[in-house]
Image (cartoon, rainbow, N blue to C red):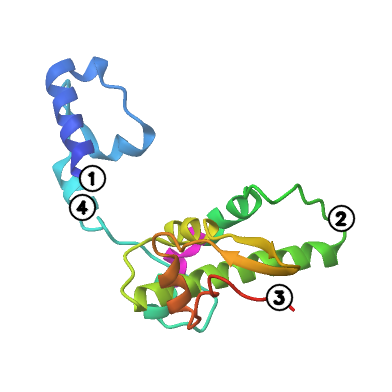
Amino acid sequence: MPSEIIERARQDLKRQGPQAFVMPRGLRRFVKLVGAELVLNEAAVQEEARYDGGWVLRTNTDLSTTDAAPAYKGLWQVESAFPELKSGPEVRPLFVRTQDHVRGHLVVCFLALVLEATLSRLLKGQKCTASYRQVMSHLEQMWAVRLEARGKAWPYRTELAGHARAAFGAAGLRPPPHVQHLA
């Protein structure tokens, strides 16, 4: 039980007395009636403190404890990814009706998560301090502009911003050249 909650309960009991102390159901085991007075049950508080910072994970996989715990803790990325994947400015509403379409959409979302996790891991391996979102923002600033001169087309790439070059390096790629001749 967090010590802030216990300390606040102690202050409330001293300042307001038992009649003003509204007790949530989960805290009832930490308070006891001694005579006509409510006091904290210190034994219950100490017993509960044994479990502070610990958690139990039950799984139906063959993963080891050292593999299952980080995988479970990383689920927040999966849960936050679905609304995030649909919120991009270039993504329009997607309505899927058949089971195959739903399955395909989930595969695409999963692949996007795999690519994000892979790039994040590669960036960390390159000692890049920027977050995945920062790197993607820098990559989005790179544009190719079509220039025409003397009847020939030339794509011109804008300068790489921030950590965009690190993303290319982490993926083992060279950035596209500034100017390239199109046949």
The extreme front residue here reads 150
Residue 27 sits in which quadrant? top left
Q: Which mark is residue 97?
A: 2
Residue that numbered label 4 is attached to: 49
Label 3–label 4 contact, CB within 8 A = no
Q: Which residue is mark 3?
A: 182
Q: Nearer the viewer, residue 47 or 118?
A: 118
Q: Earlier in the sequence, mark 1 or mark 3?
A: 1
Q: Residues within 10 Å of mark 4 (few under 14, many from 20)?
A: some
Q: Closer to the camera: disc 3 or disc 4? A: 3
| Magenta stretch, overall SS | helix
Q: Is residue 62 placed above or below 77 in the rendered structure?
A: below
Of 93 and 27, which appears nearest the observer?
Answer: 93
Q: Quadrant of residue 40?
A: top left
Mark 3: amino acid: Leu
Residue plotted at (49% across, 55% down): 137
User: Residue 52 location in percent, x, y?
Assistant: 25, 55
Magenta part of the chain: 71-77
Secondary structure type for disc 1: loop
- Residue at image mark 1: 2
